[in-house]
């Protein structure tokens, strides 16, 4: 069996090109690297190097061996990470999301937690969800698509509905509900990190201008003291930072059409379904109590 340090020396030599640079990079002596290369050749039983005065070059077999050595080291690192991540998720499940709304509901669940968990506030790119779950970097993810397959299972929680908050003097404010077409050409204040909702409003509202804000505080201040429209959802009322503004200043209106609603799923590895099911049941119960139509205007924004 070939020891890992020999593979690492070979990969480093291929990258650095000389014994001197390889030794310096690995913080060992040059004779140590020379002995290691000879030991590796003896172990494989093939010639890996062409030896010249003051120079050592990889043969074609050596190049192949270096490529395979790099792959072995990567697989070993992945194995270690996966095992460590698996144990970590069993001790404290890390929960992520592709949109921020479900994390609001999760944090507002009453009572003691059903198991140790922590929330990753950074939204996950949707295309990375399968890998994050498979490698146990995340134990559970709120998604907007059903990813059920051989390794993963998704359960629907419910819908998140998009609302728009309008100055009461805008003509659209006189409607009980508006379409994306009705909002064309307007300028909106939007929190930057809202996941899939940012794609929805960007694609569906023609000729709109979006003033994106990185910080929630800045967003709150702008919406409190300006007349720029902004978006909320039916999850907003569950947010502890929700502060209704006087109804004579703003009106909150539903946006019509299928694109104004996202179905939210809980997605996990199949082997974790039993572990998370009690939490999923509580989330479903909480979601069922959310309003599906606007209540009042609010300074809190879609987040």
Image (cartoon, grey):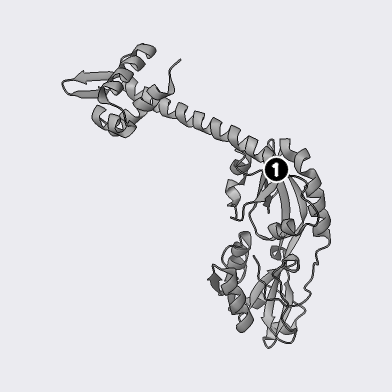
- In the rendered image, residue 152, in percent from the top left (x then y), is placed at 69, 40
- Which x, y percent locates residue 111? 81, 54
Instruction: List the residue tagged with mark 1.
Output: 268
Q: Give the percent coordinates (x, y) of residue 34.
A: 28, 20
**Quadrant position of the C terminus in the picture:** bottom right
Left or right of 255 on screen, residue 192: left
Q: Quadrant of residue 41?
A: top left
Residue at figure coordinates x 63%, y 63% from the top left: 197
Relative to 71, residue 135 above or below = below
Q: Is residue 171 visible?
A: yes
Residue shown at 54% from the left, 70% from the top: 212
* Residue 148 in sight in this render: no
**Residue lying at the far left of the rendered structure:** 53
Q: Residue at x 70, y 86 (%)?
A: 249
The location of residue 69, given as percent across then percent down, is 41, 25
How many C-alpha atoms fall within 10 Å of the one at disc 1: few (<14), some, or many (≥20)? many
């Amino acid at each position: 069996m070939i020891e890992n340090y020999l593979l690492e020396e070979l990969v480093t030599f291929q990258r650095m090109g000389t014994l001197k640079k390889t030794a310096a990079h690995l913080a060992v002596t040059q004779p140590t690297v020379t002995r290691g290369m000879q030991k590796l050749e003896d172990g494989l039983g093939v010639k890996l190097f062409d030896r010249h005065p003051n120079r050592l070059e990889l043969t074609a077999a050596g190049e192949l061996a270096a490529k395979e050595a790099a792959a072995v080291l990567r697989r070993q690192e992945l194995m270690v990470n996966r095992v460590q991540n698996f144990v970590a998720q069993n001790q404290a499940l890390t929960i992520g999301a592709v949109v921020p709304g479900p994390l609001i509901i999760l944090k507002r669940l009453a009572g003691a937690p059903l198991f140790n968990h922590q929330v990753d506030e950074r939204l996950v790119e949707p295309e990375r969800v399968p890998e994050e779950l498979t490698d146990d970097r995340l134990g559970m993810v709120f998604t907007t698509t059903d990813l059920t397959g051989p390794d993963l299972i998704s359960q629907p929680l419910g819908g998140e509905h998009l609302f728009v908050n309008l100055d009461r003097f805008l003509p659209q404010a006189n409607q009980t509900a508006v379409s994306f077409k009705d909002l064309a050409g307007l300028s909106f204040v939007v929190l930057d990190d809202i996941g899939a909702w940012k794609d929805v409003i960007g694609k569906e509202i023609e000729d709109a201008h979006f003033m994106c804000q990185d910080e929630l505080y800045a967003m709150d201040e702008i919406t409190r003291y300006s007349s720029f429209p902004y978006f909320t959802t039916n999850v907003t009322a569950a947010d502890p930072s929700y502060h209704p503004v006087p109804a004579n200043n703003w009106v909150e209106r539903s946006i019509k059409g299928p694109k104004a609603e996202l179905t939210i799923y809980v997605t996990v590895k199949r082997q974790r379904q039993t572990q998370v099911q009690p939490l999923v049941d509580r989330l479903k119960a909480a979601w069922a109590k959310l309003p599906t139509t606007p209540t009042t205007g609010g300074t809190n924004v879609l987040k």
